Image (spheres, rainbow, N blue to C red):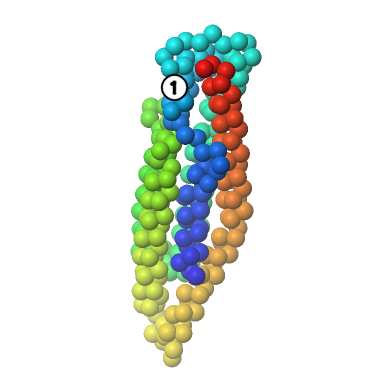
Amino acid sequence: MLRKILLATLLVSAVQAHAAYQCDSIPKDDITVSPQSVAITGSDGNMTITPTGDITFNGSARQPSATVRQQAIAYQAAVRKDMPWINQGAHQRLDQAKIALDRIITEKLGADSGIHKRLNSLDVQLKEQFSRVLSQDNGVMTYHHSAIDSVHQNSEKLVQNAMGGVLQDSLNEMGNMKNLSSTSNPLQALMGNLGGLQQAVQQEWKQHEDDFQQFGQQVCQRVTLLETQRHALYKAVK
């Protein structure tokens, strides 16, 4: 149970935080946002939209009507707002999960516990995975749709492997505690300490679960709206 709770705490924050992979409206295009334009690259064609609503489709400039131009302006503005919002929200929740687990480990095992190093390493690895979905370089942000599935799988493996080490370290460090050597039943005391760690993680998880779930739903809602806008634009300029 402890392992499952630890997995849920980090995995939901790391993977469900960019929960578009669970959404019915998963974008099937790469989207690049720069100060000059929003560019969509995919099987339906390549479109570039400027902040003033100028449209280029498959290399050819289009002459959009006033209505289509306003739709293009609204779409690119929404992309500029939503992609950074998703990125920031995902990292924020991953940080919250790590801070919460670090605090619990410090309370139960001490500030010098080796588990802190495992959590630090896992945090870096998960953020590296997430950057494969939303990358940033010199003021340009790109969404890479083909990375969603592999990032989800890789993140699960990273968390599974790390949590196996966390559980083993917990047992080892608790087994070396002074209060265990002075008790008549060290095994019972060890299990009691482990149960206390499990309860602390479970209580912490309950405080964050609703926020994680709501964020995933909000991501899906925004992605769905963006896809609806994109489909309308493609239909108008083809």
Q: Is residue 124 above or below residue 57?
A: below
Q: Residue at x 55, y 70 (%)?
A: 199
* Circle 1 crowding by C-alpha within 10 Å: few under 14, some 14–19, many from 20: some
Q: Is residue 8 above or below residue 80?
A: below
Would you identify the image quadrant in which residue 76 lies?
top right
The residue to which callout 1 is attached is 46
Q: Residue at x 38, y 78 (%)?
A: 175
Q: Determine whether, in the image, residue 64 is placed left or right of residue 148.
A: right
Regarding mark 1 in the picture, which secondary structure is present there? strand
Q: Is residue 64 above or below residue 126?
A: above
Q: Residue at x 47, y 55 (%)?
A: 11
Q: Determine whether, in the image, residue 169 is placed left or right of residue 208.
A: left
Residue sitting nearer the eye, 156 or 45: 45
Residue 214 percent coordinates (x, y): 61, 48
Residue 21 in view of the camera? yes
Residue sitting nearer the eye, 68 or 73: 68
Q: Mark 1: which amino acid? A: Asn
Residue 119 in view of the camera? no
Spot the residue most to the right.
Answer: 67
Residue sitting nearer the eye, 232 or 143: 232
Spot the residue most to the bottom.
Answer: 184
Residue 77 percent coordinates (x, y): 56, 24
Residue 197 percent coordinates (x, y): 49, 70
Residue 3 percent coordinates (x, y): 45, 67
Q: Residue at x 61, y 19 (%)?
A: 71
Residue sitting nearer the eye, 27 or 163: 27
Would you identify the image quadrant in which residue 219 lies?
top right
* Count of marks placed on residues: 1
